[in-house]
């Protein structure tokens, strides 16, 4: 699991020490953590702008994602525009709570680009296990089913666009993961060597186009990210 709470704690200490050095009156900030993902398959490279401040110096490309960024708890404006020419694509005011972690996804097609804020809160898994969840972020896949190869039952099924399935416990192992589109192209593909480690939290991201339009790329994929 990304140690966002350790990072926030370190920043709190820095803020506290700075305040002490200035006026002996510590004013620690109440912080949250937000990780940002570019999951919009036909949207160009982006600038990431939080409260009017551009936070990236290099292009934020499709499938790029950040570590947890510590920001003050409360309301913030998140805006994403074209890295090359500044064209605005999406802007939204979102609220984050103190000591909580979130993932923010840029999703959908370019003409309908939107933001999806998801809480990353979960209890830690029991001994010998990990936890895994799934987000279906393919805008044109009708439904998706995921299973471990060799297991009789799906791990996740009935996954429509923007479906977020909460964390569930799984046995620690290295798996091959089968991804099947139900309807649409009906395609099936395998993601090999998915290493699930004890005590960690993971997210499966279904991204890309089930049936890419002429002139577009970024076909349907699945990847597993540690939270």
Image (cartoon, grey):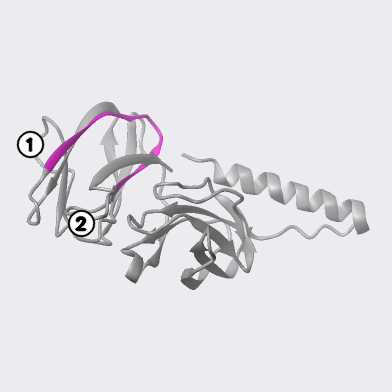
Q: Residue at x 58, y 52 (%)?
A: 69
In the picture, residue 173 is in which quadrant? top left
The residue that disc 2 covers is 214
> What secondary structure is marked by label 2?
loop
Task: Give how far across and how far down residue 194 sits, in percent.
Answer: 29, 31
Indicate whether 182 appears above or below 199.
below
Q: Which sits in the foreground, 215 or 26?
A: 215
Q: Is residue 76 magenta?
A: no
> What secondary structure is marked by label 1?
loop
The residue that disc 1 covers is 152
What separation in Å lies between label 1 and label 2 (alpha carbons)?
A: 37 Å
Q: Tell whether 63 sits left or right of 220.
A: right
Crowd class of label 2 (few under 14; some 14 to 19; many from 20; radius 10 Å): few
Q: Residue at x 15, y 38 (%)?
A: 189
Q: Residue at x 33, y 28 (%)?
A: 128
Q: Which residues are magenta?
A: 188-205
């Amino acid at each position: 699991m990304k140690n966002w709470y350790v990072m926030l704690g370190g920043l709190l200490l820095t803020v506290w020490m700075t305040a002490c050095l200035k006026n002996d009156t510590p004013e620690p900030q109440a912080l949250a953590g937000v990780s940002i993902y570019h999951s919009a398959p036909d949207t160009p490279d982006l600038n990431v702008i939080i409260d009017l401040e551009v936070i990236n110096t290099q292009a934020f490309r499709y499938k790029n994602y950040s570590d947890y960024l510590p920001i003050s708890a409360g309301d913030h404006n998140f805006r994403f525009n074209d890295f090359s020419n500044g064209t605005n694509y999406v802007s939204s005011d979102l609220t984050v709570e103190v000591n909580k972690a979130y993932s923010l996804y840029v999703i959908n097609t370019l003409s309908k680009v939107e933001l999806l804020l998801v809480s990353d809160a979960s209890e830690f898994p029991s001994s010998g296990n990990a936890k895994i969840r799934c987000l279906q972020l393919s805008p044109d896949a009708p439904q998706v089913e995921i299973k471990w190869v060799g297991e009789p039952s799906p791990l996740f099924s009935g996954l429509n666009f923007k479906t977020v399935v909460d964390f569930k416990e799984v046995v620690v192992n290295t798996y091959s993961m089968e991804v099947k589109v139900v309807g649409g192209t009906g395609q099936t593909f395998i993601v090999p060597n998915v290493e699930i480690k004890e005590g960690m939290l993971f997210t499966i991201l279904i991204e890309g186009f089930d049936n890419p339009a002429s002139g577009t790329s970024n076909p349907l994929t699945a990847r597993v990210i540690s939270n």
